Image (spheres, rainbow, N blue to C red):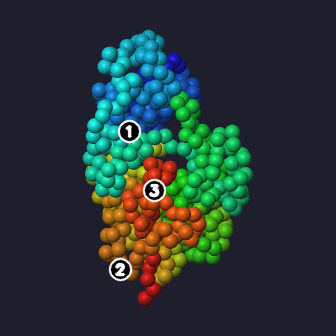
Amino acid sequence: MRAGARIAAATEVLEDILARHRPAATALADWGKAHRFAGSGDRAAIGTLVFDALRRRASLAARMGADTPRALALGAAPGALGLTPEQVAAAADGLLHAPAPLSETEKSGLSAALPQGVPAHIAGDIPAWLLPSFERAFGAGAAEEGAALAARAPIDLRVNTLKGTREKVVKALERYGAAPTPLAPTGVRVPAPEGARKALHLEAEAAHGKGWFEVQDEGSQLAALLAGAAPRMQVLDLCAGAGGKTLALAATMQNTGQIYAYDADRKQLRPIFERLKRAGVRNVQVLEAGNEEALAALGPRFDLVLVDAPCTGSGTWRRKPDAKWRVRPANIPERQAEQARVLDLGASLTKPGGALAYVTCSVLPEENRDQVEAFLGRHGEFAVEPFTTAWAERIGAVPPRSADGRDDTLQLTPARHGTDGFFIALMRRHRP
């Protein structure tokens, strides 16, 4: 497919996403099924263009003078397809499935800078109704944080120390530019693709099949480390999902002690079995999904309960840019209710002297600091332990500054730390 046809195809997919509020991955898959003539390279380029348009929807619309699928696809095309503005204009000739020729406004928008003094939600590509939440969290840095969440994300890997070393993984993936992560001691980072380069599928590598690494954002790795699992502990991963943090905890515990992995959703939990086998993990017991009676019967026996709570996912917008335009105001109180419920459940299973780690992949204070303060109001037997102390003990380096300025809980962000947006609060249950 020529560049013009790729732009036209991306416009068609964006129309489907924006008009029907569909997930981008679903819309792209459906387009591919209906257009089987498109090769893998074409589908990859169209997907890249769609995702880049969604990442910067607000700022692209401001530059192009319109928020239409056509304007967004054209505005994102130079960076996504590795073209100059002149090449984009030439590609839109109306021939062979290409877009109609550009207007003078569109031509100007392709090379224009974002106008000075635009509102912070446009500069940061943040849904306008969420700007007050970003300003609560980051003050004058709200637009900067939003813009970092609108960039492409690297691929972060966690080395499985039960089977491999960071040096071995870096060597195995050196052709992709792999290098150690700045903060996580067993992390490896592969840079984000530039321009029209295809995204890498590192899970197809032999090193992954051997169990040497798992794909896991550096922020998620840091959350698992700071939680404080140690050999011979009794640990509960209460919202285990596909098991990424469960695997990280098992490696930290050196395959000793016992980890119980639980999730309310059996579809989310299903991949954990294959991952445990590949990683060589032997100290995990997977509980029946959704069986809270069996979970409650375990009682307050756990040295550590990790609550990776359901949330809006605002911290993962780099990887799921369509999600930020689908979230609605009603979603926040819904997530808050779920978070409070799972925190209370986790508290009931934490033994006296044990730790409760609350983690979200969110940057919204409603889901983060507000939840911690509400939880402490309900559970006076718990108190926050400063993340700086845990960092020194469990990671050993100088702790970073939290993006929200706190010194007890930690907010990681791509702008400040190069990670996804993760919030981490460590709480200890007092002994009677």
- Residue at position x 39%, y 54% from top? 363
Q: Residue at x 57, y 68 (%)?
A: 394
The percent coordinates of residue 382 (x first, y second) are: 40, 78
Where 262 falls versus 219 (above or below)? Answer: below
Q: What secondary structure is found at the residue carrying circle 2?
A: loop
Q: Considering only order in the chain, which callout, 3 or 1, is on the residue closer to the N terminus?
A: 1
Please say if 343 is above or below 139: below
Q: Is residue 370 visible?
A: yes
Give residue 44's quadrant in the image. top right
> Residue at horizontal 41%, vertical 38%?
55
Number of on-image labels: 3
Give whichever of discs 1 and 2 has the lower sequence position.
1
Q: In the depicted view, which residue is nearer to us: 216 or 365?
A: 365
Task: State the SS at label 1.
Answer: loop
| Label drawn at residue 380 | 2
Front in this rendered view, residue 44 or 228:
228
Q: Amino acid at mark 1?
A: Arg
Question: What x and y, as percent, mark residue 102?
Answer: 36, 16
Q: Is residue 19 above or below residue 308?
A: above
Name the image quarter holding residue 67: top left
Residue 412's tag is 3
The C terminus lies in quadrant: bottom left
- Under circle 3, the secondary element is strand
Task: Tell me if residue 191 comes above or below residue 425 in the rendering.
Answer: above
Q: Is residue 265 left or right of residue 232?
A: left
Look at label 2 and name its amino acid.
Answer: Gly
Name the residue located 48 percent from the left edge and 75 percent from the top edge: 355
Location of mark 1 (residue):
22
Percent coordinates x, y for residue 59 in the rendering: 34, 35
